[in-house]
Structure formats: C-alpha cells, structure tokens
Image (cartoon, coloured by chain):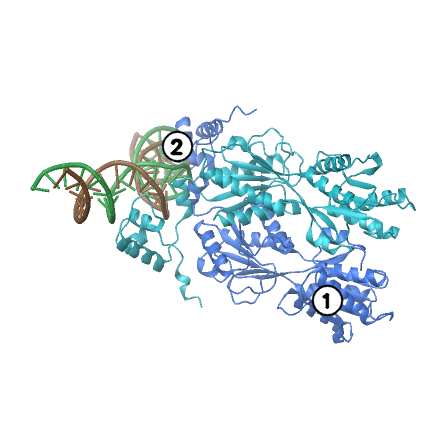
Chain colours: A cyan, B blue, C brown, D green
Amino acid sequence: MAENTVSLNKATLKDVARAAGVAWSTASYALNGGPKPVSEAARRRVLDAAQSLGYSSNLLARGLVTGRMRTIGVLAPDFHSTNATEQIAGVEAEAQLHDYRVVLATHLSEPVRAEIMQRDMSARRMDGIISISATADVKPGVADVLPILGLPYIRTYHAPLDGLPGDYAAVNQEQGGYIATKHLLDQGRRRIVYVGPLNRRDAARKRLEGFRRAHAEAGRVLSEDQIVATETFYTSAGLEAGREILGRHPAQAVGCDAVLAASDTLAAGILRAAHETGLQVPGDLAVLGFDDITDLCDGLYPSLTSVHVPLSEIGRWSVRRLIERLDHPKDWEPTTRYFDCRITLRESA
Amino acid sequence: MAENTVSLNKATLKDVARAAGVAWSTASYALNGGPKPVSEAARRRVLDAAQSLGYSSNLLARGLVTGRMRTIGVLAPDFHSTNATEQIAGVEAEAQLHDYRVVLATHLSEPVRAEIMQRDMSARRMDGIISISATADVKPGVADVLPILGLPYIRTYHAPLDGLPGDYAAVNQEQGGYIATKHLLDQGRRRIVYVGPLNRRDAARKRLEGFRRAHAEAGRVLSEDQIVATETFYTSAGLEAGREILGRHPAQAVGCDAVLAASDTLAAGILRAAHETGLQVPGDLAVLGFDDITDLCDGLYPSLTSVHVPLSEIGRWSVRRLIERLDHPKDWEPTTRYFDCRITLRESA
DNA sequence: TCAATTAGTCGTAACGTTTCGACTAATATA
DNA sequence: TATATTAGTCGAAACGTTACGACTAATTGA
C-alpha cells in the first residue's frame, strides 16, 4: 500500500520544467497563471510533468519573492479558557475558507513573551496578526509592540480605548447585560440581583452597566444590595454569593426572584445555593448566566439559560477584515466593531 | 510613544553588514554563530548595527537554505471539543518551550480536506506533523497521506492499530475504565452500571473493557443490565439512560448504587435523573464521569468526580518526541505510547 | 628562520521561487 | 509589401539567508 514512498517530494520547479522541455518561467506561468500567457500545448506538458513528478511548490521560496505567505498569526493569552479557544476556532475556520493558514502563539499575559512572539511572527513574514484577548482587561504591554512591527493587525476583545491604533473587534457587553436584564424584567421578575467580579476593569462591569440601563428604562429603582461582587468567576464564588443572597431574605417570597450572573460558572454556584435552600428554579428563582458554554449549560439542573457571546463571530470577522485590508491596502481605515449578544433559552430563566 | 514607527523592519542582513563594515557571511556568523569563528570586535559592531537598525532575520530565507523552519503542523478534526483543544493546548505549550511554532489546520473529519491540509503543510516546509484525533475512532482516509509526504509525523488518540507506521500517542482508555470501576468497588458499591455509546468502535468501548476487568478481578459477576448503551455523549442521552436505570429498580436499596458514565456530559444527565428521583448523591448513588472537564464538573451539584484523561500530556509528549526525532533522525524508531488516566476526586463519588 | 597551522574574513554559490526585459515568430494593419 | 502588434518563450535577476572554499595575517612548532 506504500509503493510510492520513494516520492520524497524533492521535485522542484526546475525538474518539472526540464521534464516538460520548457524554461522555469514558463513552467511557473503554466502552473500559477503568471503575467504572461502560455500555449495550451506547453501548459499540458507542464501540468502532466508536475502531476507525474508529484510536484508541489515550495511556499517558502514563493513567500520570499512575493512577500505574502497566506498566513495569519494569532496571538492569544492562553489556550484553556473558552473565551480564547472560541475566538481561535472562528479565526481558523474563516482563515481556511480563504485558503489562509493560522499560526499560534500564546503569551500567558506576559509582556516579554508577547513581544517575542510578535517579533517572531514578523520574522516569519506573517501577512497579519490577530491579537486575541480573553478578558476585556487591558493587559499592559501585551500588544504594545504591534504598531511598530509594520504588520497589519487586529485586536479582539481588548478594551477598546487603550490608545492603540488599528482595527478592533469587541463584544457589546453592555448590550448583553441589557438584554439579559430585560428578559428577566419582561418575565415579571421584581427583584433581580447581579453577581460578578467588579474589582477589575472587566467585561463584568460593562455587563453591569447594561443591567442598570435596563432597570432605568423600566423605571425601576435599583438598590445597591442588588449588586453582589465576587472575587472570581469560579463556581465556588458563585455559591458563596448565592448563599449570601438567598440567606439574606430567607422566607421572603419576593426577596430575590432572579439572579443574573456574569458567567455560567458563577451561575452554576447560584443554582447550587438554590438547591441547598430548597428553592425551585425557575419557579421561585430565575437564574441567567453569561457565556453560553454548551456543555455546562446543558449539564446543569435545571439547564441554564445564558447570554451567548459571539466569540466565534469575532474571530471570523477579524479574518475577513484583515484579508480585506491585505487585498485593498489603499482604502483601509481603522475600524472598531461591536458584536451584539443574544440569549440562548433553556430552563432556568 | 510611537516615534519609532518609521522602522518598517526592512533592514536586511546586507544592511547590517554594510553598517558594520563586514561581509554578509561575517555578519551571519556573528549573529547566529556560524561554522567559522568571528573576532570580538567584529561581533560587537555587527550586534550594535543589528540593534540600531532593528534587524530581525527573515525566517523564510533561512528556512529555504537550512530546510528547517522550527514549525510543527497540527492537524485536528475540529476546534470545539475539549478532546481536541486540550491536546492542541499541550502541543502549543511544549512547542513554545522548545522555540517551535505551531500551525493549525482542521479537516472536519473529511478526507479530502485532510489531504489538502497535509500537502499544504508539506509545501510550507513544516518540520513535522502531529495529527490529532478527538475520538479513538478511525476516520478512514484522514491520515492516509501522511506516510507518503516524507515528513515526520505523530498521530495521537487515533486507534493504535490502523496499519499506519510511525509514532503514536494514545490514552489508556481501558486503564481509565479500570481505575474508575475499582474506585467505586473499593467504596463498597455493590451494583455499578456503565453508561456509554457502544455502537461505534470508540473510547467508550475500551473503557467498558476496563469496567469488566475490574469486576472480574474483584470476583464480581457482571449482569448484562449493568451496561446501558446510549446513542450519543450528550446530557440528554445521559438523562434518558439515568431515568431507565433508576426507574428499573424503583425502591430497591441496592438496585443500583453507582453509575460510571463514559463522559462528564452523560454523567450530568445521570445526576439530573437522580435529582428527579430524589436520590442522594453520593449517599444513595455514586456518579463518576469521564474527561474531567473542569467547568462542568465543578459546576454540577454535587460536583462530579471524574476520570482525568491526560490529553495535554499527550500533546506535550508528541512534541518532545517529534523534536527528538528531528534532532537525531538516525536513532529513531516508531513508538507507541499509552498514557494512563487518573481520578479527580470531587463530591459525587 | 621557514613551514605548517589556525583565526578571521571575504566572495560567492546555493535554496526554489516569481517576474522583468528581451527575443522570436506569427498575425493584423495600412 | 513593409510595419506595428501581439502570443509565446526564454534567460537572468531578484528575494534574504547559510555555508563552502579561498584568501590573508598571525601564531605555532621545529
């Protein structure tokens, strides 16, 4: 089954040309449709020769002369958070659609490592860079070197106004918080509590702004104990917050009839607190998460209604935008694009 | 803060050499320690020149002449399953450690696409390919072209004995099933039910073998209704199976006191069925999952004890193995390596 | 002191492409 | 018929490196 193992794909354009009895240049024209036409007869012979020699062109050599590698560098903080991987998935899928390849580099939010990676991408002559962030936080210095590389780049999910020029794709976190809250209010929930980490300048804060706006528009006064700060996004933090919230108004029917959590993992903790307290979800208490992590939301009991964040879409758009810029460098100008969230309905709210 | 924007990194080795007053070759030796020594004085001048010109070497040109790009191609079916991403994460992390970069390609389990990607990687002169599988199923044709490319490659998580030569890294699924079952038996569980999809030749079957072996070693007879087949790995399938199992022996105390699920998502369904039935977990019923998906296991109530599958380790090992082969091509021979699972203890078992 | 070694440097030939300018032969234009 | 135009082909010059062979100048050994 492996009689052809001898083809160590050493065949070069020169070989093909020789086999077809033409000059390299002609062979090149025949294969890739260069700037000069080539006769049907010659084309045939070249194509046949290439076929039978198992020729495939050396993209390094081509890249060296053309200056384009059809490759996009993706810079990400890590590879574990769904935030990052979903975006990368989108990037990869869209890139493949346009016959671009993707090279990966993680920087673990360390500026030095980030700079090394960016320089490396430049040295490898990537056509452009997409710098992904998994939080809306500004990681100081992580993308600072981008502008001086002279490569087209796009940042996603970073804080929009960090002063760096260039394209920018972000989640409309505020809108996410807004529709989530509106969804709960429309259900007739009277007292909604928002749970999330507020210490950092983060997505959770933006979501909170949406939470406030929805209340304001509905003419609802928001008391400050309707906002509960957590330290992290972990389930344990959610559980702690949940116990506090539900313990605060023990037997009171309308003490708190809905919780909007800044992440699905937090929401899982709330759900657990509800179980412990014996509350029915969504009957006594509605719970709404953020991120729409399928496995988690489906697995929870009851399954978790969650705000879907269009991460994959962000990745896809970034690629399209980058390629557009590469193809028409003239009519490009920096763009900031926000992506709206939507709600994935399940049982909990 | 961006006064240096002019440095369009056009500086070439020739420029550096000119600035330092030496020949290209000398500059190259000074920068990368070539085969000839270079005087301290010259080295200084070259390094300084390189520094002030913002020189970074063109890796394409270098790759063209050296034939090594310090780049590994990663072939994966998709980008959404944790199975795939965890492995890729391991690959990326380890590659970075050795100053290798990773380029990504998904083939969606379509043989044609897989072949295109593999040829592209060869054309880009990757040093080697790691072909990742997310299931232990053999996807026919997906990796068939690898051997004829003449590139070193490693397959992970594929079915080990699919006839293709080369390095191979796999999960010891049987051992996973074994330790999981043993864990439950050691707890004193009397009647354990295994839940998983059995129609396909898949990881779940291997796990079942371990389940059987543990019973045999403990001298326990296994009745066939202790094995429940599902169609999928989804939570809904787990719920269905759970209802069947728990409904089958309604009030009977020792009807079934433990469930080993072939995945965490299935286990989530079992947990839900337990809630519906009013059973206490782990008191009345122990539930053990497979895959150890952190967010999910931590989020469930009670949190899910799960068999951890060393996916990231597989990725890391593959990279080390590949680099070893690249560095010492002579003393290489095909290796198959199995990676053992371990149990991550949480509340449910 | 003379030959043999060696440290240091320099050209230059690869590597495998694309593309430019020049060259033929055929075709259309007047 | 002479001339401009074109289709088709070719050789050679890039692209930016590494590495080989040759060449000096200095150092060593006898």
User: Residue at 89% across / 44% down in the picture?
Assistant: A247
Is residue A155 left or right of A244 when viewed as pictured?
left
Residue B23 at x, y = what percent? Answer: 37, 32
Query: In terms of image quadrants, where is residue B12?
Result: top left
- Of residues A224 and A257, the one drawn nearer to the viewer in this rendering: A257
User: In the image, is residue B325 above or below residue B63?
Assistant: below
User: Residue at 32% across / 54% down in the picture?
Assistant: A16
User: Residue at 46% across / 41% down in the picture?
Assistant: B59
Residue A75 at x, y = what percent? Answer: 57, 41
Q: Are marks 2 and 1 in contact (CB under 8 Å)?
A: no
Q: In which quadrant will I find the C terminus of chain B?
A: bottom right
**Mark number for residue A249?**
none
Is residue B151 left or right of B81 when viewed as pictured?
left
**Camera-nearest label, 2 or 1:** 1
Which residue is the site of mark 1? B195
What is the chain identity of the residue bearing mark 2? Answer: B
> Which is nearer the N-term, disc 2 or disc 1?
2
User: What's the amino acid at mark 1?
Assistant: Val
User: In the image, is residue B150 above or below residue A147?
Assistant: below
Whether residue A234 is visible to the viewer of this picture, yes or no, is: no
Residue B72 at x, y = what percent? Answer: 52, 50
